Amino acid sequence: MGAELEVTKRLQQMILPKPEELEIEGLDISGYMEPADEVGGDYYDVLHTDGITTLGIGDVTGHGLESGILMVMTQTAVRTLKEVREYDPVKFLDALNRTIYKNVQRMNSEKNLTLAVLNYSEGNLSISGQHEETLIVRNDGKIERIDTMDLGFPIGLDDDIASLISHATVKLQPGEGVVLYTDGIPEAYDIHKKQYGVEQLCEVISHNWHNSAEVIKDAVITDVRRHIGKQKVFDDITLLVLKLEAEQPNLIKV
């Protein structure tokens, strides 16, 4: 079993987006994932096709081999739908859910996952799927928290969720962006059982928003680790930061 877990863990790490895949013109992106156990159930991805950047973030119930396999299945399904240019949020998540549901049934598993899929292009951001809150960060560091409970349904729990899928749209200006995370961050607790919380996450993001996506990501992870201290980490920690590059002033040649 230990060998199987190690193989699955390596496969998970292999399918995470490589640094060069995050180098998308006009965007500053940084991602982080650390599993609590040998194999975690968190998922994130960044895919770019035809000028549309797709962000995916999810959290499979539990940990271990089954969760890790379901995470890999989800990544493959998301990439497949992206490659066939399916951008309708209802059709996208409905097809993905049916794929995962049928595999979960074949596995005789009770696993499912929360999953949010975001599409960005030319200042327009579309958000669909049920997951943690999506954090929209404005130029001044002010954060708008978007509840995703009504934008979807857990993936793999039911064979037909089309009627439960919706989407929200947000306009982003240069210098603004979005932060995605799994519950391993707000629910991380210290030795006194105090949770880190979304409010603290927002405070760190807001305070550091003038920096690059990489610095923002590092600031959050450092603060979460400070909060946890010597306490054991019980859940996967995943964070994804996307920031639109600020407009450059026009240079006038003399």
Image: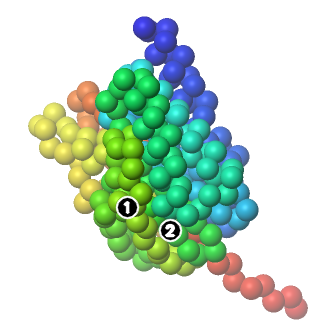
State left or right for residue 159 relative to residue 27.
left
Residue 7 appears in the figure: yes
The residue at 46%/16% (across/down) is 5
Question: Quick check: can you spot residue 216?
Answer: no
Q: Amino acid at mark 2?
A: Ser
Q: Quadrant of the C terminus?
A: bottom right
Q: Nearer the viewer, residue 230 or 120?
A: 120
Residue at the far front: name it: 160
Q: Position of residue 175 (x, y in %)?
A: 54, 73
The image shows residue 8 at horizontal and vertical percentages of: 51, 21
Residue to which mark 2 is pinned: 126
Q: Secondary structure at mark 2?
A: strand
> Label 1 amino acid?
Ser
Residue sitting farthest toward the right = 254
In the image: residue 240, left or right of residue 232: right
Q: Earlier in the sequence, mark 1 or mark 2?
A: 2
In the image, what residue occupies the spot 42% across and 38% down? 101
**Location of residue 67 (image quadrant):** top left
* Residue 237 versus residue 64 in the image, above or below: below
Q: Pick whichever, 236 or 189, lies toward us.
A: 236
Residue that appears at 34% across and 32% down: 111
x and y percentages locating residue 53 in the rendered image = 62, 60
Callout 1 crowding tier (Cα within 10 Å): few <14, some 14–19, many ≥20: few
- The residue tagged 1 is 163
- Element type where label 1 sits in the image: helix
